[in-house]
Image: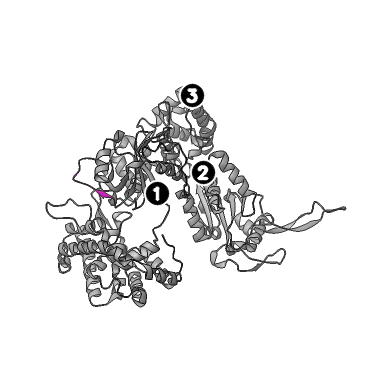
Amino acid sequence: MTSMTNGADVLTAAAEFDRGSVADAESVAEDERKQVLSQFPLEQWAELPLERYALGQTASPGSGPTYCRLLEFLTPNLGSIKGGSAAKHIMYHHVSGEWRLAAPLRGMEPQEAWAQLRGQFVQAFDAVAAGDFDTLDDLEVLRYGPTLVTKTLATYFPEHFLPIYAGEHLRRFVALLLGDSVQGDAPAWRSNRRLLELVRDRAEFEGWTRYEVMHFLYRHSDPRSRQRTIWKIAPGERGRLWDECRTDGVIRVGWEQVGDLGLYQSDTDLKQALDAHWPRKSGGSLTLARRLLAFRDLEEGDRIVANRGVDEVLATGTVSGNYRFETDRQEFQHTVPVDWDLSHAQRLPEPRQWRSTFARVDPAFFAKLTAYQAGSGAGANQEPQSTPVALPEDVQTVLDALKRKGQVILHGPPGTGKTRLALGAALAMDGRAEALDANADQRAKAQAEMLHGDRVHLVTFHPSYGYEDFVEGFKPDLSAKGPGLTLELTDGLFHNLCSRAADHPEQDFLLVIDEINRGDLPRIFGELITLLELDKRNLPVALPVSKRRFSVPPNVRIIGTMNTADRSISHLDAAVRRRFAFLPVGPDPDAVSGTVGPLDLAAFFEALNTRITRHLDADHQIGHAYLLRDGAPIATEEDLAAAFHHEVIPLLEDYCVGRAELLHRILGGLVDADTGRPLLMSPQDLADALATEFTSGDSGPDA
């Protein structure tokens, strides 16, 4: 992808763009547009029935797709409105039987709500036909479905709109042509009109069709560009659907009982449906819900590994289209189109922790898989000749937040890897991204080298840490001769980091603050809290102790970590909260995928955290690090017993101090109901007892 930095660059690239490469896609798009006009003529909208509009209804034989299904799933060449739930359609029929309505329509009966919504669509059509585009902004209900509405207007009035619908994409493209940032949150249709005006004002785009403009902008400055998701997805038990998936160019998964995944607005929404159909599996339903929604939201270009069992790769693939729910199938109705590459099929030299349908795939391991060619003798046990470093998604998220805000706090329960993630982002920022996928010793060596350098500094806050340690203050001069105590003005850690950053403006400098919430942040930061805002960088202030002028350079970044079990975000000073982006780091069941005797480790982990959340709160869950040894899931009964008795139980006892009945509700038969004393048993018996208590389908005492 070519990177565009300003309007001049875009116009230069436009002159070199092969407009002929769009011809086939444009022809298909026009056919799709004619399909919409044929099935939903503009003049019939005033009488359009609800059953022809909304998603989630049982289709009558021969009725064809609803309008919303046609626009989201069956007209991709007209421009995509894919992503997220059916809420973008303003009203839809949920699988629960309820009608889900946008805020202005709530409390209305479905037909009343539809009359209101349909009326505003008709008003919008009349306004655009009359050239009165300002009226669109007054149609309150339509503002709850900006992408759908903008695609609708572009379909019926192509002379007035470009086939680009996402508000953020439109703002990015407008800024690109202006060569400057764009403020405000204008409706998508208004941003679309502004972009069209900018295009028409540029001689370089004279004679271009709107599809040529769309393809050019996305090809040369795609705002969707991100770290590609890589998922391992099993095509049925023991790969029994593989032949069908390979032939049809798709990947399919089950759980069709919950219906179309596009109708769910949140992971909790889907979890409730999963719990209703499989009540004995409710311990891990939230994780499954999140995986299913991630499957639904796969984008073109995301990568898939199809597997059979724990040691066989059937193929790798590239997502080539949008999720769809195929109601004409008896099973495995959730479907995503994939272009398969069979040349990567191979037996793995060592089994993977692939016992569930879904699993995240490490980018480095995927690079090894895709370096393999069938019959070449190479494979996942050999290093590829040249592997580009792809940043893990969580690391990229931190870097993006730092770029946007300047400061980030990673928060979550103990043991979720917050410090590891912070140092991972630091490695990437310091040009050591290859260490992220190295073994533990190599990564530790890279971190030590990084922290011995000048660009990254690690500090742990504590109650006695103060302004004089962080910014400046008078401290004893230990080198002074003679009687008495001599004080010397000393620059603090952050002052020194900012000084080095000011001397090297072309480099980024990073401060990692572990346990940031254990310090008195207003006292530590003092007046510098104002200077953390990106628009106030380089703004000088007089330090109160030395009266020297000081500023925070724009190339300084801060990552803090905090355990929410110790202190919630709400306890942080409000001025501090406003200046940090907060990224949750939660327990990761994928990290502990494995078995110990009869115990499914991930299922135990999820079920235990479900009980903790129910009886305490989500902030007191346990992190996956408690069930890891040397970065891998614990694999022996002895390690399991040590982790459970020496780490997990003491942590829970601390949370439940003085409340024996609470510990019993969390651990069930693993503790004495009266005293709260953990039962003693052999490591072998413990694995069996945990499996019985947490993974047998029972949701625990007093559930």
Disc 3/disc 2 C-alpha distance (Å): 27 Å
Q: Nearer the viewer, residue 425 or 362?
A: 362
Compared to 498, does 642 lie above or below? above
For the record, the magenta segment spans 322-329
- Mark 1 or mark 3: whose residue is earlier in sequence: 1
Q: Secondary structure at mark 1?
A: loop
Label 1 is placed on what type of residue? Answer: Thr
Residue 276: x and y in percent read 29, 40
Q: Nearer the viewer, residue 187 or 458?
A: 458
For disc 3, the marked residue is 683
Q: Residues within 10 Å of mark 2 (few under 14, many from 20)?
A: many
Residue 363: x and y in percent read 44, 45
For disc 2, the marked residue is 417
Compared to 77, does 413 lie above or below? above
On the rendered image, what quadrant is the C terminus found in?
A: top left
- Disc 2 or disc 1, which is closer to the eye? 1
For disc 1, the marked residue is 229
The reply to whether discs 3 and 2 touch (Cβ–Cβ < 8 Å) is: no
Residue 424: x and y in percent read 53, 48
Q: Residues within 10 Å of mark 1 (few under 14, many from 20)?
A: some
Q: Main secondary structure of the magenta part?
A: loop
